[in-house]
Image (cartoon, rainbow, N blue to C red):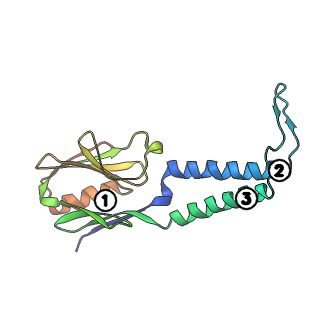
Amino acid sequence: MFQFREKQFLGYNQFYILIRLVLSLFCFVAYYWSENPKPVYTVIGNFRIGSYPAKDIPNSGELFFLMGIAIIVFSIVLMFIPHLKINGNKDQLTLIKFPSKKKIEIPLHEITFLRCKKLKGNLFLGTLFNNEKQGIKNFFTNGDNAVEITLNSGKRFLIGTNKPMELVNFVKFFYPQINVLENI
């Protein structure tokens, strides 16, 4: 039997990877600064970075180092935590959010229109599940491809997927009369 399956994991969202990377970098710079607390003079102009401000707090540098390591370990763990699971069978597409197991079911026989899209500004997109924006319900974890689905009732869904053409071909396999517009 022909099925569609895809899992999307929390740790692969580019925006949040960038945030965690910057935070861990800050922690490691603070650790280095605590180990070398002397003022630093730069070559460009007379710019001076003062001495380490938390000299009086014991083990503050080690705390920053441990926080940096903890952020990196947290980022690695997030790469194994699923956020969105897309299952498709001959009757419906099922979107399941982890860890709450919240389900959204989209009946295939009600689909009238499919469109493959590239998401714009996807670096700043967070993870979305059933978030409505401009009349479209959004389901997204990572990546820059999506499939927009329009139902008979006028409801619209935007499903972020790493396999947009595979999802479209899956729906077209069971309902070849559905209109498809490819923007990718």
- Position of the C terminus by quadrant: top left
Estimate the spatial distance between the alpha carbons at disc 1 and disc 2, rounded to whole Å.
Answer: 60 Å
Q: Residue furthest right?
A: 38
Q: Given this view, does label 3 or label 2 mark the residue nearer the observer?
A: 2
Q: Kindly identify the amino acid type of the residue bearing the numbered disc 2.
A: Asp
Taking the spot 37% from the left edge, 44% from the top edge, the residue there is 118
Question: In the figure, residue 104 lies in which quadrant?
Answer: bottom left
* Residue bearing mark 1: 166
Q: Position of residue 46 (x, y in %)?
A: 84, 26
Estimate the spatial distance between the alpha carbons at disc 3 and disc 2, rounded to whole Å.
Answer: 14 Å
Estimate the spatial distance between the alpha carbons at disc 1 and disc 3, rounded to whole Å.
Answer: 47 Å
Taking the spot 26% from the left edge, 64% from the top edge, the residue there is 103
Q: Residue furthest front?
A: 56
Q: Residue furthest top?
A: 45
Q: State the count of labels.
A: 3
Q: Given this view, does label 1 or label 3 mark the residue nearer the observer?
A: 3
Left or right: 137 as drawn, with respect to 178: right
Crowd rating for badge 1 (residues with CA inside 10 Å; few <14, some 14–19, many 20+): few
Local secondary structure at mark 3 = helix
* Residue bearing mark 3: 63
Crowd rating for badge 2 (residues with CA inside 10 Å; few <14, some 14–19, many 20+): few
In the foreground, 167 or 49: 49
